[in-house]
Amino acid sequence: MVLPFNIFSIGKEPKSYLGVDIGTLSLKIVELSNENGRPKLQNYAILSNYNLIENQTPKVFGGEAAPMLRRMLKESGITAKEINMSAPIFSSFLTVMELPPMPESEIANAIQFEAKKYIPVPLDSVLVDWSLIGTGADGKILILLIAIPKDLVNEYQFIARESDLKLINLELETTSATRVLIGNDPVPAVLMDMGSRDTTISVVDGGYLRISHSIEISGEDLTRALANSLNISWRRAEELKKEQGLKVTDNNNQINDVLAPLLDSIVNATKNIIDLYFSKTNKKIEKLIIYGGAAKMPGFSEYLSKGLGIDALIGNPFNKIVYDAKLNPIMEEIGHEFTIAVGLALKAIQ
């Protein structure tokens, strides 16, 4: 299979940490080291195969993740063997559960007993993780509960094993994005990732995920809508989306008319999530951070900001990462696409 392949090698240091983001259409690797307490970029790689869209392949990277990952590691010169990987929210489950006040030593047992009330699948079919995220106004203990299907865990373990790697951690993609884009910022915010398969909208408060919801509108849906409405090829539609997007120009009205209904659905879904969080917590959300492949579509952040009445910013996962200044043009162009991979590598350092 012939693939567009893009590798950037920046150098090696003895100890490094890998984050590997395996998506439907692309593989991304970020290698970080710890330089005097600050994360430093050692290497990164990206491989994309947009033919999978046109072939409508449903598997993760067309079922070719392991051989392609081996190729990326070899050609980029990455030798680290321990990796962190992420699972998409649409194939997992996340909720905030409440427990009555109790000693911290009793929480784990209580979660085991109560989890079946919150997770809508048999508990023996998933791996469950949890975090204590605070206390509600009524004194109840708030627990972030995450469940990932065992079949999905096995798939990622297989990919790692076939790539001669050791999988150390598997977490939700949104958790990785929260780590790198939000950190410990106490101000409530919305994270939005428009991927090739869906759009994930999450509320983060106090550095913890509170709500995460996927809707079945994706960047690929925008491309298909343009291709069908303008009677052009998928590749030409993808170019128009990336080059023109929602720019307000005399020649762009037709593109805007095609994209607006889909984007309005995303705006409305985001409004509903913001309103839901306010109804539960009485906290207003005044900031939205966009990340992922569609984040830099021209006019997208402005469209969201206008529709939601809040600031919409493009997330920069390399904002607190040390890297060579000569990479600035590249980071400006594609840095936002590495959000999840950077967050995964940071987990190993932190």
Image (cartoon, rainbow, N blue to C red):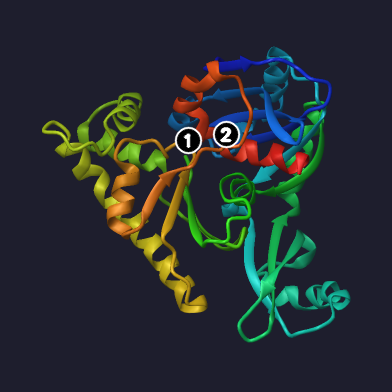
Which of the two residues, 209 or 161, is positioned nearer the viewer here? 209
Give percent across and percent down for residue 242: 34, 30
Q: Residue at x 63, y 79 (%)?
A: 136
How many other residues sit within 10 Å of disc 2, few (<14), some (14-19) or many (≥20)? many
| Residue ID for mark 2 | 318
Where's the C terminus, which quadrant? top right
Q: Which residue is drawn at 69% across and 28% down?
A: 40
Return the residue found at the far right.
105
Amino acid type at mark 1: Gln
In the picture provided, is 262 more to the left or to the right than 195? Answer: left
Give percent across and percent down for residue 146: 69, 61
Q: In which quarter of the image is residue 210?
A: bottom right
How many other residues sit within 10 Å of disc 1, few (<14), some (14-19) or many (≥20)? few
Give percent across and percent down for residue 241: 31, 33
In the picture provided, is 285 more to the left or to the right than 173? Answer: left
In the picture provided, is 336 more to the left or to the right than 15? Answer: left
Which SS class for mark 2? loop
Which SS class for mark 1? loop
Amino acid type at mark 2: Phe
Q: Nearer the viewer, mark 2 or mark 1?
A: 2
Q: Which residue is drawn at 40% across and 38% down?
A: 220
> CB of mark 2 within 8 Å of CB of mark 1?
no
Give percent across and percent down for residue 86: 67, 44
| Residue ID for mark 1 | 56
Dot label at residue 280: none
**Residue 185 visible in this rendered orientation of the protein:** yes
Of labels 2 and 1, earlier in sequence is 1
Where's the N terminus, which quadrant? top right
Q: Is residue 97 above or below residue 158?
A: below
